[in-house]
Image (tube, rainbow, N blue to C red):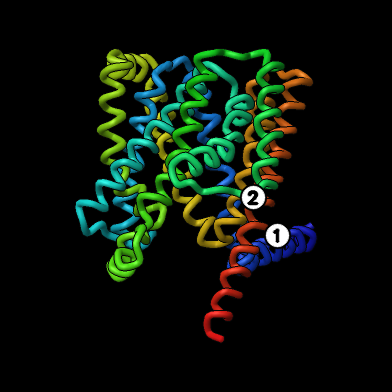
Amino acid sequence: ATKATHRRLDRVVGVVVEVAVAMGSPGGRSAVVIACWYTANVGVLLLNKYILSVYGFRFPVFMTLCHMCMCSVLSAAAREFKIVPKQFIRTRRHYAKVAVLAVTFALSVLGGNVSLRYIPVSFNQALGATTPFFTAIFAYLMLRKKETTATYMTLIPVVGGIAVATWGEPSFNFIGFCACLVGVCCRALKSVLQGWLLTPAREKEAEKMSNSNENKLDSMSLLYYMSPVAIVTLGICTFIMEPDAISAFYDAAEMNPPFIAILLGNCFVAYLVNLTNFLVTAHVGALSLQVLGNAKGVVCTIVSIMLFRNPVTFRSVAGYTITMVGVWLYSSSKRRSARLQVIENANKNLASKV
């Protein structure tokens, strides 16, 4: 029996060693980071839904304010402990651009959290998948940036699928629907503004800003500088829209002390979403992150239906499937256009040298 026990222990140790070696390899580290990213994204959505709907703390604006406070504190800590690179804003003009982004970012998160009070996670994710549609609209209206005809055609199933999903959604709520659309529009607007505001327009300005690294903030440094502005924005929104939130928080904490731990855990996971997003981009690249993001919506939808048992119909499933196919086609078309643009620029450079 002793020999058999030793053999089993040897096998366990061997497995542990193999896992440790795999995690030490670049591929192993990337897999761990991606797994953490998925866990954080799914976790924050489910915790938001649990607190707002199941637990009954119906103050999404205040909850979003708590998220941003945690992001501000932990972003500062990550910079000080050199977990992420320390970058700086050196001009008032640059900070003004970041402030505009911060307000848009706060409203995008706020819209998504408010919607979770009224609609299920599955419908929230289905509406969130339409972000490329609104991004294309804002990019054309603000930057006059045109996509290829094939790219625009892929947006038809994105919107058509949502129309079908909305028609067949048994838990449809107009307030939640509008709040989610506001969040989606602000998310799309933020992505366009980020490319517009943080990228210089003229070559001389570009050279000057390139030397000062002003337009090269990574996502974690951007979060660090956006957080204070977002906190002020959400604080004003809380004061106007949810004046009883703080008293309700104290009542909930007094009646059920574990609520404080639940809310703090929720805020910590909200920060982890941003941190793991930064780490995934560093390990696998932005394009791979986009593909993973498309799959994330499907994972969140399946897990939420399994946990919260919200009713689904064939129409809602079919509509969401059509939307996800459209998002996949859109991503593929954008990657193809980017590759063609790189080849075209390379050919132009060669022609200019000859």
Which residue lies at the image location 32% right of the left edge and 69% below the top edge? 207
Q: Is residue 311 above or below residue 111?
A: above
Residue 86 is situated, as x and y percent measured from the top left of the image, at: 31, 61
Q: Earlier in the sequence, mark 2 or mark 1?
A: 1
Residue 320 is situated, as x and y percent measured from the top left of the image, at: 70, 29
- Give the quarter of the figure containing the C terminus: bottom right
Which residue lies at the image location 54% right of the left edge and 36% below the top edge? 134
Q: Is residue 182 visible?
A: yes
Q: Secondary structure at mark 2?
A: loop
**2 or 1: mark nearer the eye:** 2
Q: Is residue 257 above or below residue 100?
A: above
Instruction: Say whether residue 278 is left or right of residue 149.
Output: left
Q: Residue under circle 1?
A: 12
> How many discs appear?
2
Residue 43 is situated, as x and y percent measured from the top left of the image, at: 54, 36
Q: Secondary structure at mark 1?
A: helix
Residue 129 is situated, as x and y percent measured from the top left of the image, at: 61, 35
The extreme bottom residue here reads: 354
Which residue lies at the image location 35% right of the left edge and 54% below the top edge? 221
Crowding at mark 2 (Cα within 10 Å: few <14, some 14-19, many 20+): few
Q: Amino acid at mark 2?
A: Thr
Which residue lies at the image location 39% right of the left edge and 33% below the top edge? 264
Q: Residue under circle 2?
A: 148
User: How far, Cα to Cα, is label 2 from label 1?
Assistant: 55 Å
Crowding at mark 1 (Cα within 10 Å: few <14, some 14-19, many 20+): few
The extreme left residue here reads: 92
